[in-house]
Image (spheres, rainbow, N blue to C red):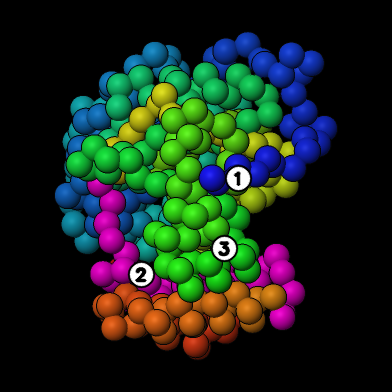
């Protein structure tokens, strides 16, 4: 059985009222979508917004494009939802795209961050917003479904030596199944909801109060681990991460292990993130777990081999520098 770890105690910035519940949020909602060569999926997301945002009064949709070479910008500009489009002029990364949008958003607005390959189910945004009535909640996330309707295991534990070595030696699927890995696999939490440590960043609703306390996303990660970092800072500010299974979304997604570049980048940022919060010896052991695990699986495909090479050649500054090529 997976243990769902409670977040840090609330500080004064995030302390709940005596009843723990605020009146239903009437603050505006800003929907932020970051695109990069997303033409094949963006239209489907935008088509899903009217139903997904049903029950939300004040709302704005912002699409931030990271210099796509396809028709992502044209699709956004010509869609009936009429989103505001920001063109960054460069492939600035996911966190930078979010920051470009939130700098334009009024501070009292809640923000719904969406990958372009998300499809919102009807009423999902309203259900997420209702969960923000609990003033201790800083981020809310829905149940995520795969394209075939199966449950996507989107809940995670904070990276640790225990989770890293369990994933390396047992494999992520087995480690998750026995409650030792980074992926949370307990069916009960996926059905009942509750507080978790972090969730995959494809769809997140961020409360205005958390935005004000946490500040901007860390752009040094470029892609991958930025959501781990952001939600760690949310918890450190005294807020919780709430999982709301009544709200649902479909994530088309992709398999990063099939892409050597993305696998290497993910590995670099995993080690870099862990190193920011732990000493040199612990970080070396974390890195070694990845070397061992990916070395055992190097024959399974180029993604595993790229992850192994990234771990072998990791340099601390690598996690804070933009990659030299794009996916």
Vertical placement of residue 145 versus 287, above or below: above
Which portion, as a residue range, is magenta? 252-281
Quadrant where the N terminus is found in the figure: top right
At horizontal 22% and vertical 42% (from top left) the residue drawn is: 147
Which label belongs to residue 262? 2
At horizontal 28% and vertical 51% (from top left) the residue drawn is: 253
Q: Residue furthest top?
A: 23
228 part of magenta stretch: no
Residue 327 on image: x %, y %: 30, 68
Vertical placement of residue 132 versus 296, above or below: above
At horizontal 68% and vertical 40% (from top left) the residue drawn is: 6
Q: Quadrant of residue 11?
A: top right
Residue 77 falls left or right of residue 188 = left
Of mark 3 and mark 1, the one earlier in the sequence is 1
Are the residues flagged by discs 2 and 3 in contact, CB closer than 8 Å?
Answer: no
> Which residue has dot 1 on it?
3
Give 5 or 32, whichever is nearer the viewer.
5
**Closer mark to the observer between disc 2 and disc 3:** 3
> Which residue has dot 3 on it?
163
Q: Residue furthest right?
A: 12
Per the picture, the main secondary structure of the magenta-coloured stretch is helix
């Amino acid at each position: 059985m997976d243990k769902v770890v409670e977040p840090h105690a609330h500080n004064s910035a995030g302390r709940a009222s005596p009843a723990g519940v605020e009146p239903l949020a009437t603050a505006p909602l800003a929907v932020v979508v970051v695109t990069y060569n997303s033409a094949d999926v963006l239209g489907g997301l935008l088509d899903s917004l009217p139903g997904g945002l049903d029950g939300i009064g004040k709302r704005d949709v912002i699409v931030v494009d990271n210099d796509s070479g396809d028709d992502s910008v044209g699709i956004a500009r010509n869609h009936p939802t009429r989103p505001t489009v920001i063109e960054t002029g460069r492939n600035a990364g996911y966190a930078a795209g979010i920051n470009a949008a939130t700098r334009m958003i009024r501070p009292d607005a809640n923000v719904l961050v969406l990958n372009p390959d998300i499809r919102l189910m009807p009423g999902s945004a309203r259900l997420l917003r209702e969960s923000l009535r609990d003033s201790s909640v800083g981020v809310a996330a829905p149940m995520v479904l795969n394209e075939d309707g199966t449950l996507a295991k989107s809940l995670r534990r904070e990276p640790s030596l225990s989770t890293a070595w369990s994933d390396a030696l047992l494999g992520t699927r087995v480690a998750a199944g026995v409650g030792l890995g980074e992926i949370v696999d307990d069916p009960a939490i996926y059905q009942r909801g509750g507080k978790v440590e972090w969730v995959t960043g494809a769809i997140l609703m961020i409360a205005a109060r958390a935005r004000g306390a946490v500040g901007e996303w860390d752009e040094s990660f470029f892609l991958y681990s930025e959501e781990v970092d952001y939600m760690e800072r949310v918890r450190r500010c005294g807020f919780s991460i709430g999982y709301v299974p009544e709200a649902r979304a479909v994530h088309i997604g992709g398999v990063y292990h099939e892409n050597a570049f993305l696998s290497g980048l993910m590995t670099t940022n995993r080690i870099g993130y862990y190193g920011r919060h732990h000493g040199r010896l612990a970080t070396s052991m974390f890195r070694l777990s990845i070397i061992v695990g990916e070395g055992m699986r190097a024959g399974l495909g180029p993604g595993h081999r790229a992850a192994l090479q990234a771990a072998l050649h990791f340099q601390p500054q690598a996690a804070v520098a933009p990659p030299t090529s794009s996916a």
